[in-house]
Amino acid sequence: MISAPDVVAFTKEDEYEEEPYNEPALPEEYSVPLFPYASQGANPWSKLSGAKFSRDFILISEFSEQVGPQPLLTIPNDTKVFGTFDLNYFSLRIMSVDYQASFVGHPPGSAYPKLNFVEDSKVVLGDSKEGAFAYVHHLTLYDLEARGFVRPFCMAYISADQHKIMQQFQELSAEFSKASECLKMGNRKAFAGELEKKLKDLDYTRTVLHTETEIQKKANDKGFYSSQAIEKANELANVEKSIIEHQDLLRQIRSYPRQKTKIPDLQPGDTEHTQDQADQVSTTSNPEESANADLYTCRPAYTPKLIKAKSTKCFDKKLKTLEELCDTEYFTQTLAQLSHIEHMFRGDLCYLLTSQIDRVLRKQQPITNFLFEDFVEVDDRMEKQENVPSQPSQDRLPPKPVEECPIPKVLISVGSYKSSVESVLIKMEQELGDEEYTGVEATEARSFDPQENLDYLDMDMKGSISSGESIEVLGTEKSASVLSKSDSQASLTVPLSPHVVRSKAVSHRTISEDSIEVLSTCPSEALIPDDFKASYPSAINEEEAYADNEGAIHFQASAGSPEPDETQEGNLENIPSQIDSSCCIGKESEGHLVPLPTPAYTLSDEDSVVSIPPQRYIQKDQGLHVDFGVENTDPSPRDNSCEMFPAYELDPSCLLASRDVSKMSLDNYSDTTSYMGSAASTSSDRIPSAPPAGLSSERHKKRAGQNALKFIRQYPFAHPAIYSLLSGRTLVVLGEDETIVRKLVTALSIFVPNYGCYAKPVKHWISSPLHIMDFQKWKLIGLQRVASPANVGTLHTLSRYSRYTSILDLDSKTLRCPLYRGTLVPRLADHRTQIKRGSTYYLHVQSMLTQLCSKAFLYTFCHHLHLPAHSEETQEAVASRQTSFLKLNLGLVNEDIRVVQYLAELLKLHYMQESPGTTHPLLRFDYVPSFLYKI
Amino acid sequence: MSTICPPPSPAVAKTEIALSGESPLLAATFAYWDNILGPRVRHIWAPKTDQVLLSDGEITFLANHTLNGEILRNAESGAIDVKFFVLSEKGVIIVSLIFDGNWNGDRSTYGLSIILPQTELSFYLPLHRVCVDRLTHIIRKGRIWMHKERQENVQKIVLEGTERMEDQGQSIIPMLTGEVIPVMELLASMKSHSVPEDIDIADTVLNDDDIGDSCHEGFLLNAISSHLQTCGCSVVVGSSAEKVNKIVRTLCLFLTPAERKCSRLCEAESSFKYESGLFVQGLLKDATGSFVLPFRQVMYAPYPTTHIDVDVNTVKQMPPCHEHIYNQRRYMRSELTAFWRATSEEDMAQDTIIYTDESFTPDLNIFQDVLHRDTLVKAFLDQVFHLKPGLSLRSTFLAQFLLILHRKALTLIKYIEDDTQKGKKPFKSLRNLKIDLDLTAEGDLNIIMALAEKIKPGLHSFIFGRPFYTSVQERDVLMTF
């Protein structure tokens, strides 16, 4: 197996002895370190600490024709980030690469200066001594006053981790290309504008000179030209030549190859307009005509001035700033994009890599993602991040993609400007509808934070200051730009701020309208199946017994208005029966859809001590059958009920539920009965809690993980509580202090399986009376305990419904819920765990839940498990086979089986939905004995 | 590619290499910084083709390009820096290794570069590390060679009073040629036989109706488990290309798309050479039913390797990462030391160099049986065949399995990071880690550690401390804490 030349020589025994030193030792510079990580502290994290900067940053540098390579600005603009790192030296290093292979300028044999549209170059290089490595994106911008009309710039992503740059090369390249295209697009526009102005000036100068020459001609009666006249004539000829040169340049910049416009997802308006412009150029045979046509239409406000005729090759000593070269709005967008890049690639490579792998793998399993993944949110967020530059301001608002970022209205007046190159801005604004426009404006306004612009100013200033000997020159330039920026900021903020408010109002109204739509088409009451409706008022009756108690959970349709009850009674037929009778007296239905046959499952120790005595209705539950057929749902009462309830009382999920009410099902095997139903709630503030802002953010995860860790360490009964959540039994967290309850609910929410992709079935805090339907919608509820004598009643009420719920009382430190004797939850939530941080615990939970999902997936889609092996096989045999599979193949014991079965039910329901995310909540009744746990 | 280029440096030597198959490499160059003339090209290697894609002038221009700015070079002593160019204007990508060396009595800067068309960017990037590692090592040896050459020449000048400066440094070229050609061959073979990014599960063992249909259950379990324990790095050998490739594809299912692109299928008729640094490679046995693995190259692979023989259903694995890296570094140092001490050109020939070093005897028994059993792969294989083949169910289940592994690896990294305050404190509680993260089975820990090593290099060495202990011994020690 091992080749001979390599192995034959090895005969010595002293395997780990160092080599003898009787011969000259190998100099260390020619050797390799024995321990690759020993030189920098011998750990995998320390290699990043060799650099003089604290974290990755972006540097924009220019090869100035006046002062040479110089840093312009850094992102983030914080001196702490790059610390003592020598930006000047590094700029020199990265700009000294002669990337520009093509000729730019006045080629020999060519009559006029020629513009070359140079493609960007990308270089990865480093300074191993400084521990700095960089992805450098070189680009060239056009400047009429620069040598050869070009100004070389580069944008560098600087990191201490070389592997990070190489491993993320394609992503970095793609993101920086967007930033570069944005700069270049702005630059072409600005360059064309500059040319137009110059042409106007030249034209005006020509007219003046021509007039003067004519006057001199007329005044000349001597028959020969004076030297002054000759001088004027030469000057005129120079101006003529200059005009031709500039017109040629204008033609060239306008004929920028369309295929080179590489900004992906360019807005249609943009493309069209660019196309229009290009077509206009191509159809205009005479460039002079076209130039003239634009010249006098584009910038009516511009007043031409007399200029001294000189060659275009001459350059002014005052070079334009990057912002001036690219137009403020493009410059701002580029900075936003760069800021987004900095944010996107920030941090340790291992987290970047795993998040990328994670995303790819999650996309391959759309069936199970809804259970525990923040899939939609995360992906949306990531995709947005990919396209969207983050706003550099501290109050970061939802970012918009560079290519979608419209230009603030105040910066470009629709009527006042018509670009000759890429007039995307005007087109966009014209095509936007009123509503869109308002929304767009709001985003624009958000993205143009004055503070943010000031930050950029700072960056600019600092960049110039750090460039050593060029301080004076650049300082002067910057001071000019400061003024212009300040002006633009003033114009930005004041008029735009009202738009923000207005747009927010509009978006709010839109949501309300949606709610109204729901109300009109999907009355919540109509969604309650007839058989279930029978049970509905019984809850009210039950509640009535405790109505006096303020702390009681009120099971009524609408807490605030008792009148609808009467109306309901008028409209709905089967209301008056009690909830228990409704649960117990149902039509036996064989035809209803059972999502997944639940195997016979009986708690082995039924006779164990039950802290809470069984409720008086339990006996009636035995052998319960309820028909949840939707056929009887009468559309007319639906309409009526629609009128009865205000929009805010309706649950958006009812819309989803209404589509497939027939899937409501009931499982009743043995003494462990599960009921799954679908209905809508009618009480106020019952809308499933939308995920809190930045639900999947790192901070949220960290906090949730930390609080969950505290919970499992503090409460010995954490396991049954988590089991309740994992098995679909609603857990009510009862407490006086809202903060504590909310915190715990947030912590426990990481264990709650989702129904669909829209929201977690978690209600963080509720103070109004609970309705039975709340248990259907929410699997984790934070309930306020009212401090009053009626408190006793609250507990009593909760105990009545303990068959539906588990109750965690934070004040008395008790938990009432079914027994848990599995092995799964202890691995998930071990109170002796040495995990120190919340974020780590969150990761641990995430991986364990993924394992659980995998088991549920296998159980759900195992083809031979759910179908009878032969026609004579009984349901019991199938169930037995399933149990055996769960125990033997999936290694599940006791209550763990119920967890996997519940997840499998959800999976199957979700899979059967026509469109993903429309799974409606299930109402489960688990008639298993509850235990009271105390600390 | 642009044709406007300055004239090439005079008298640039060129080696044309005949390759079987399509070569994605346009050229390789060796350039140096002349203190008077600036960057100059010393040697060009180019594949022998009918169609000239890049003229010598263009190659010279690009090679000079790579040294631009290197007058400002600020590197640690002995550093070999990597520069990577994507020059859209020229339509090429260039990978340059820049280093300092002594030549002509002066310390100068050199650049060994390979040039590929820009269209091969996505093909090349997954192979970047392989190419760079191999060229880096040959440069290490080349620098020693140049240094010795200088010493010898100085002695000759003193003794003979003659100048032979023109010849100096020339002899590094054959040495570089010895590695440039294999790199070209590697890229050519990868162009034709690399594993596709997306593997159809139908082409793998996981499509069988039941476990054991294609290969023995225990063998498959061992193969996948060991493959994951050795960071996804495996060599599959056998007499049947079809059988070998099926296992190669199966193992590649457990890799990331980029790693798959750095894996190679077996050639049907004749066998490829073993290539150090690939993740999975299929190799065909010769007519005698044997395949010889070059010890040196196996040692130089960045990760330990699993050796899988599909003919006799054996699975052997190298020691874990920290031991492998330690052994590798010792081997490298020995090789370079032997090179340094060599007195004649014959002594310095690559294959004989190790004979001269009597002080170092590496453990030849590098492939051992798979000792540590795992529960993760076992459970996966027990379960996956319950799902109906031919649908996407198994692919989804596999994705879930990989997601679990990656999440566990990330959790493990984070756990150690927290426990040691990012390496500031030593890690003491392996037992706690195993219990807390449900990795009590030794094989499970190995798999997750191997995965973590790939995304956080150096983790093994950090946790298991002195690497020449076997991992078992080390863990026993750690368990006592």
Image (spheres, coloured by chain):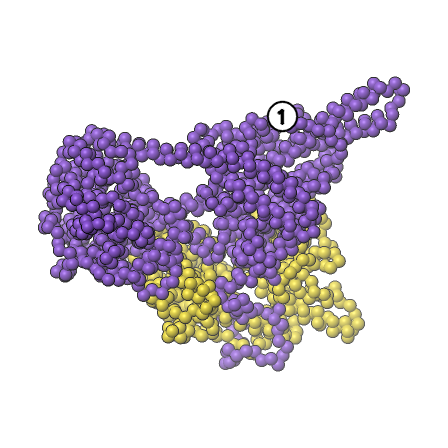
Chain colours: A purple, B yellow
Left or right position of B194 against A539: right
Host chain of mark 1: A
Query: In this view, which residue lies farthest toward the front?
Result: A789
Left or right position of A883 against B474: left
Badge 1 amino acid? Pro
Q: Mark 1: few, some, or many residues within 10 Å (few <14, many ≥20)?
A: few
Q: Is residue A441 above or below residue A778?
A: above
Q: Position of residue B159 (x, y in %)?
A: 77, 75
**Helix, strand, or loop for circle 1?**
loop
Q: Residue sitting at 50 percent across and 77 percent down?
A: A16
Residue ID for mark 1? A300
Asked whether the viewer can see residue A403, the reply is no
Left or right position of A599 against A908: left
Q: Residue sitting at 41 percent across and 65 percent down?
A: B419
Q: Position of residue A743 (x, y in %)?
A: 33, 53
Q: Position of residue B251 (x, y in %)?
A: 40, 58
